[in-house]
Amino acid sequence: MSDYIPFALQGEIMKRLPTRSVLQFRTVSKQWKSLIDSSQFIVDYSLNHTHQQHLLVCYTSQEDFKEKYVSIIDDETFPEHKSSMPDSIAELGVALIMGSSQGLFCLSIVRQDPRCEYASLVRTTVIWNPSIRKSVAIDTPHSSMVFGFGVCPYTSDPKLVKIKFTCGKPNLDTRSFTPWQVEVYTLSSGTWGSIPTTNQPSDSIKLRLDQVVINGFIYWLAIDYINISMMTMEFKGYNLIVSFDMASEKFMEISLPDTLARAPNSSLSISKLKEYLVVVEMVREAGKRVYGIWMMEHGVPNSFTKLFTINSPDASIRAVLGFRKNIYEPICAMRADYNVHSVLVLALHSEHNNYTLMSCNGPSHTARFYMESLLLLDH
């Protein structure tokens, strides 16, 4: 091959191949290994949008109550294979997927600290690349906080955002809030750094755990507790979206339509379709769950439009987990009965029938799309 094809062109060809092939090519020659291990090749490969899209499904097995991961290629055949974390990470405890970006997943593991006599919890944050089966563990303090995770599109540097909320002492009728405590960790530096309070949202805003990353922004669902009555334990608040720009490290508040802003916070979830932010609203009608799908138009904040409603004739849909490249093909968690669970593609507005991606013996917690990446190869 090298006798007939220029070396630069060989590199361009390898950037379009699956990670399994690229990892095998590292053993062919020192020249190829040096190219593939270079930071520039790793970044270029990860930004290549010609790779097939994968869906990572996480569920809890009812046999051993352990987390199981299945990766499914998003094509017409939907072949699947098991994805397992390294044993050194799995031994730490149950992992919760906090976020994903550019082929990397951020897992949070909370466990008891064996070095302490008294009950003390420690949190380990793991950045995991299932395509190359490599991970990096980061010890982080365990307290009342929310994490954000994303890969900066300009530097390809994975970032963690640690946000701690603190409520002030209550007055007779209200409760005050203190400013957020925000720190940002970059994998390249291996250190945490604080960001100015001027870059933060209102103190009364609290973030939820679920998040998505789109075009260099981390998005969270949030609720603004604008007025809490300590006398009646009632609150007046509204739902909104909070974004974090990984380049400027600034937050922004994004308003939702009044219907979503006043909905029960637990009835909302966020997802994405390609590079668009989607909000899923769940309401109960006649004993079943009905889902409204809203999308932020053209990435413009405060511009949400309701696209359609998912109203299944039965009550088996438990959650909308995400969307394929077509907005009218949502990925749903189904439950026919106590022991039968599945992940299903609903073919809305299509001549095709619904089809099952996988069946599992436990409920599905998350399903996230990702593209193969070489990030973490040089760590």
Image (cartoon, rainbow, N blue to C red):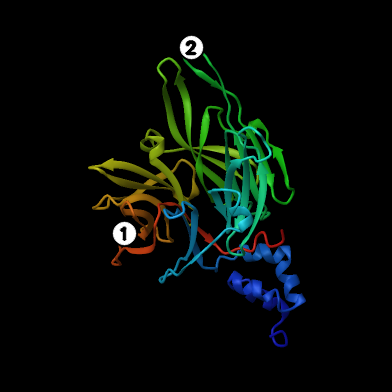
Q: Which residue does the numbered mark 2 point to in the structure image?
A: 172
Q: Which residue does the numbered mark 1 point to in the structure image?
A: 348
Residue at point 47% right, 52% down?
Answer: 276
The dot on residue 138 is none
The amino acid marked with disc number 2 is: Leu
**SS at mark 1 in the image:** loop
The residue carrying pointer 1 sits among few (fewer than 14), some (14 to 19) or many (20 or more) residues within 10 Å by Cα, namely some
The amino acid marked with disc number 1 is: Leu
Q: Which is nearer the eye, 108 or 368?
A: 108
Q: Earlier in the sequence, mark 1 or mark 2?
A: 2
Residue at point 44% right, 43% down?
Answer: 303
Mark 1 vs mark 2, foreground winner is 2
Residue at point 55% right, 53% down?
Answer: 100
**354 sits left or right of 155 in the view:** left
**95 sits left or right of 320 in the view:** right
Q: Which is nearer the eye, 308 or 31?
A: 31
**89 sits left or right of 82 in the view:** right
User: Considering only vertical position in the picture, is 77 above or below 219?
Assistant: below
